[in-house]
Image (spheres, rainbow, N blue to C red):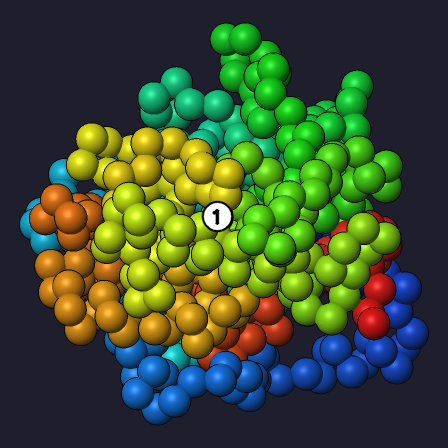
Amino acid sequence: MRIDDPHTPAYLSRRYWLQCMAALGLLGALSPHDLFSILNQAASPAPNATGPFSQEDDSLLEEIEKGNFQYFWEQAGPQTGLIKDRSNAFDKDNRVVASIAATGFGLTALCIGEHRGYVSRRDARDRILLTLRFLWKKMPTHRGFYYHFADVNTGERTWDSEVSSVDTAMLLCGILTCRRYFEEHSEISLLAYEIFNRVDWTWLSEDTSLLPHGWTPEVGFLPYRWDYYSELMMMYLLGLGSLTHPLPVEAWNAWKRINFEFDGISYIGSFAPLFVHQYSQAWFDFRGKRDKYADYFENSVKATEAHRRFCLQLARQFPDYSDDLWGITASDSERGYVIWGGPPSLGPIDGTVVPSASAGSLPFLPQAVMRVLRNIRDHYPKAWSRYGFVDAFNPLRNWYDADVVGIDVGITMLMAENARTGFVWNTFMKNLEAQRGMDRAGFKKY
């Protein structure tokens, strides 16, 4: 059944109801009692606060989240709902490139915004419907996967970008969050069901357990594989959770988990910026769970602490870094966009501070991160904008970015909310696809 199918039966057959249940994410190994309980749940009740924050700190996080929300509300295509990849935070911005990853963050931001009272439920619902209808009916896809970058007004591919596996995964995480938060709305549920189940993970893994980064019509599959620990976890877990085109279980075990050590801290890592320890954990709740390899939440705690100490050691060369000012991840710089971070040292580090590096780690090191965010807000006014913090700044060179980047705004907002209330985790993890993915990957509570 498709929601726009004119042949949907007028009578309510058993098959029709089964398809509707599937659309709502209710099919699976559920007893009648469990199914009845799910159907009678209130729509995403406000979760209890879990963050160890003072009233002053919580007020700052509220200010940050409000600004972040404004980005996703204002920088969406009026006909598509797609979110711009980046925008000038101080002046009119005429760029038209949208990012599907930023759109996934933006859909989640709409749920947070309604939950926090930044937007009415009706307006949030209407924006979500606009976006999902466009994604389902009009935006170009290949085997259900979306192009990384698209025109914000038309959805057409831009920059000869690839059909992206991991960026599609971030979009799907946002879609599934909307499905559960607006579960009383049948069209949102059905659209989310259609979009998610159109994604053909078996095509992506046809001749390999290691998923490719993407595909283009010009060259086919890209030669790069998701073969080392990184932001890949959400992608593999969504594929494992699919009912229509599931990945084999061996895909979860195929990628490598390399042990790193820095200043006495041992953790699974990669030669990549700090965001690899954040993105999957914006939606998937790894707390108190582990597979046969690791507790990935605690692993991110260790990796973040290693990064903090790495920045402190860099203070000998760049004296702006301190306990009050640290955090380097892929970002803008005075010379353009740069992939940098550590440990080990990656890229031409020059003293630039990236607020989303620390803010995206709020659930892992809440007090250490708040120390940084308070300092930036209080002492670096040019690093603040109507959308929250600018993407990056370098106090040693008196350089302040004029832009914000959608995915960096997104990881800041989602992790701030998770650190405060666990809202995104609690909402997203109601999806049976997410639960099934983690179960098939072998996660157990302990």
Residue 59 in the image: x percent, y percent? 30, 84
Residue for point 39% across, 25% down: 157
In front here: 233 or 181? 233
Residue for point 85% across, 53% down: 292
**Is 129 placed above or below 331 here?**
below
Residue for point 32% across, 31% down: 348
**Is 392 placed above or below 205 here?**
below
Residue picked out by circle 1: 274
Q: Tell how many labels.
A: 1
Quadrant containing the C terminus in the rendered view: bottom right
Q: 113 left or right of 382? A: right
In front here: 89 or 239? 89
- Specify the quadrant of the image occupied by residue 124: bottom left
Q: Secondary structure at mark 1?
A: helix
On the question of residue 337 being in view, the answer is yes
Residue 282 in the image: x percent, y percent? 54, 59
Residue 26 in the image: x percent, y percent? 77, 65
Amino acid type at mark 1: Leu
**Is 169 placed above or below 178 here?**
above
Q: 437 left or right of 194? A: right
On the question of residue 354 being in view, the answer is no
- Specify the quadrant of the image occupied by residue 298: bottom right
Outermost residue toward the front in this view: 316
How busy is the neighbourhood of tag 1: few (under 14 within 10 Å), some, or many (20 plus)?
A: many
